[in-house]
Amino acid sequence: MPLRRGESTASRSGPDGLPRLLPADTTMPEGLRDHLARHGFVPYRNGRLQLAADLRAAGLTGRGGASFPVYRKLEAVASAGGRPFVVANGAESEPASSKDASLMWLAPHLVLDGLQLAAEAVGAQEACLYVHDTQGGQLASALQSALSERWSARIDRVPVRLAGAPARFLAGQETAMVNLLNGGLAVPTFAPPRVFERGVAGAPTLVQNVETLGHIGLIARYGAGWFRRVGTHAEPGSMLSTINHADGSVRIIEAAVGTPLRSLLAADLGTDGMDGPAQAILVGGYHGTWIPAPSAAGLTLDNAGLRPAGASVGAGVLAALPAAHCGLAEAARVVHYLALESAGQCGPCLNGLPRIAKGLATLAGMRPGPRVRADVERWAGLVAGRGACSHPDGSVRFVRSALTVFAAELRHHERGACSATARRPFLPLPSGTAVSDEDWS
Amino acid sequence: MRMATDMDKQLRVNPIECSGHGACAELLPEMISLDEWGYPLIDPRPVPPALERQARRAVNGCPVLALQLGRKR
C-alpha cells in the first residue's frame, strides 16, 4: 500500500469518472487504511491561503445550499484578524436529504481531510464537526472513532471535536449553529456580525458543508483541472444529490453539475416519449421549488439551468411526486411542519407561517372558500424577507410554487373533488416537534 | 430624483428584537407602516435628509431598540 507521509501526491492523476467522493463499495464505511490507499496522505500546504488559488481555479462552490464560492469565504475568514475557528457543517436538517449523512458514513476520512485543509488555509487551530445525533448516535460514534484513529495516527494537525445538532429543521442554519456552539440554543441570530467576522467564541468562523470539504480534499490532491473535467464551465465539478423517487425509494447519487434531470429521474419522468409516474418534481427540498414534470424533463441540475424555472440546486434534493398523490395535501403537510419548525423569534414568521399552513390545509380540503388562496398569497408576501434567517423566504418559495404548479388541482378542490387516488402521505417528515428549549439544544 | 450615495442612511429592523410595539410607525408614518399583526413594514429606500431627524426619533423611540438607522448595505 500506501503512500508514506510527506510523499508527493502531485503526480497522482486523479480518478476518472464518477463517483469521486463516494468509495466504489457503498456498503461499508471506508476505513483510514483504505482511504489512504485510495487517495494518499493529506496534502498539507504548510501555509495560510495556499489552497485558496486552487479552489478559486476549480470554481468550487458550497454544497450546503447557498452555492457560495468557497475561496471567498476562506479569504474573508483568514483576513478577519484573530485566530479563526472552523466548523464542518454536517447537520443535514432537510428531511428529504441524506447525502451528507451518506458521505460522512461512507467516506468520513475524505471529509475530515478537507476539514484539516480548510483549517490550515485559514490558520485555525481548532475545529468542530457538527452533526445530527440521529439513528441511535451510530453516525456520530463512527465519526468519533474516525477522529480518534486519525489523531493517534498523527494525521490531523488540528484537533476536531464532535458537536451534536438538535433534531430541528433550522439546526444547520449558520447563525443557529454558532449560537448553539456558543452555549445558546440552536436558533438563528440577527446578523451582522456575520459568522466569518465573529462566530464561535467570538472568533472569525469558517463554516463549510461536509460535502464541500470532501471536494476540498480531492481538489487539494488532484487539482483544479481535474475537478473541472466534469460539470459545466460556470458550475464545475460533481455534486451529491438525494433523489426521492416516485416509487418511494431514496437514492444518493453523485452526478456532474449540469446533468439533465431527465437522466437522474428517468424512472419518474419517463423515457422515449412515455410519461413516467411523476406529476411534479420538488427541487431543493422544503425551501425549494415545485416544477411540473413536463418542464422538469427539459432542465439540468445546475443553477443556470434551473433559474428559468425559478429554482436552484440548493443542497441537491430532488423529490418526484407521483400523480396518484394530491400535491396540495403534500404541500399542506410540509408547510405545517415548516411552521412548527419556525424558531418563533420574528413576528412575521411567527404569525404568518401558521396562518399560511392553515390556509393550505383548507385549500387541500374540499370546497375551500373563495378568499383562502388570496389570504395565503397576502400572508406569503408579508412573511418573505422579514426574518432574521431565510426560513420565511424558503417556506414562501415552496408555498408559491405549490400554488402555481398545483393550480389545476386547486380548481378540482374548489369544485369539491380531488384527483388523487393515494391517501397515504408521501414526502418524508420527521415526527416530533419542539415543545421546550431543550428541543433546541 | 436623487442619486443614491454611500452616505445614504437606511432604516432596518432587527426582527428578533422587534415586539410589534408600533412606536416607529407613529413617529415616522412617512416611511413605516404596520402589517396586520402590528409589525413594521419599512420603506427600503434611503431616508431623505428632510426626514432624518424624525427617523432618529423613531429609532430612539423604539422601546426594545430594534430599529436601526445605518449606512446602506
Image (tube, coloured by chain):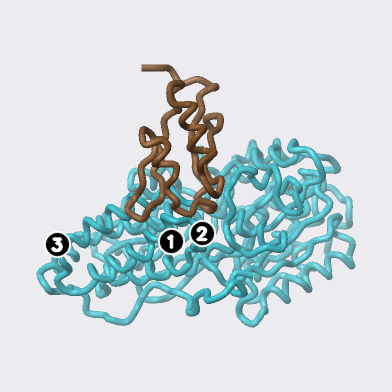
* Viewport quadrant of the N terminus of chain B: top left
Q: Are marks 1 and 2 in contact (CB under 8 Å)?
A: yes
Q: Nearer the viewer, mark 1 or mark 3?
A: 1
The circle on residue A350 is 1
Rendering quarter of residue A414: bottom left
Q: Is residue A20 visible?
A: no
Chain holding disc 3: A
Rendering quarter of residue A380: bottom left
Residue depicted at 77% across the width and 44% down the height = A121
Q: Which badge, 1 or 2, is on the more N-terminal residue?
A: 2
Between A223 and A63, the one nearer to me in the picture: A63
Chain holding disc 1: A
Chain holding disc 2: A
Q: Colour of chain A?
A: cyan
Q: Which badge, 1 or 3, is on the more N-terminal residue?
A: 1
Between A236 and A439, the one nearer to me in the picture: A439
Q: Are marks 1 and 3 in contact (CB under 8 Å)?
A: no
Q: Secondary structure at mark 1?
A: helix
Question: Which amino acid lies under the numbered mark 3 shown in the image of this protein?
Answer: Pro
Residue behind mark 2? A345
Position of A372 with respect to B22 (left or right) is left
User: Horizontal and vertical percent for residue A314?
Assistant: 48, 53
Q: Nearer the viewer, mark 3 or mark 2?
A: 2
Q: Which chain wears brown?
A: B
> How far, Cα to Cα, is label 1 from label 3?
25 Å
Question: Which amino acid lies under the numbered mark 2 shown in the image of this protein?
Answer: Gln
> How far, Cα to Cα, is label 3 from label 2?
32 Å
Between A256 and A145, the one nearer to me in the picture: A145
Residue behind mark 3? A370
Q: Is residue B29 above or below residue A84?
A: above
Q: Secondary structure at mark 3?
A: loop
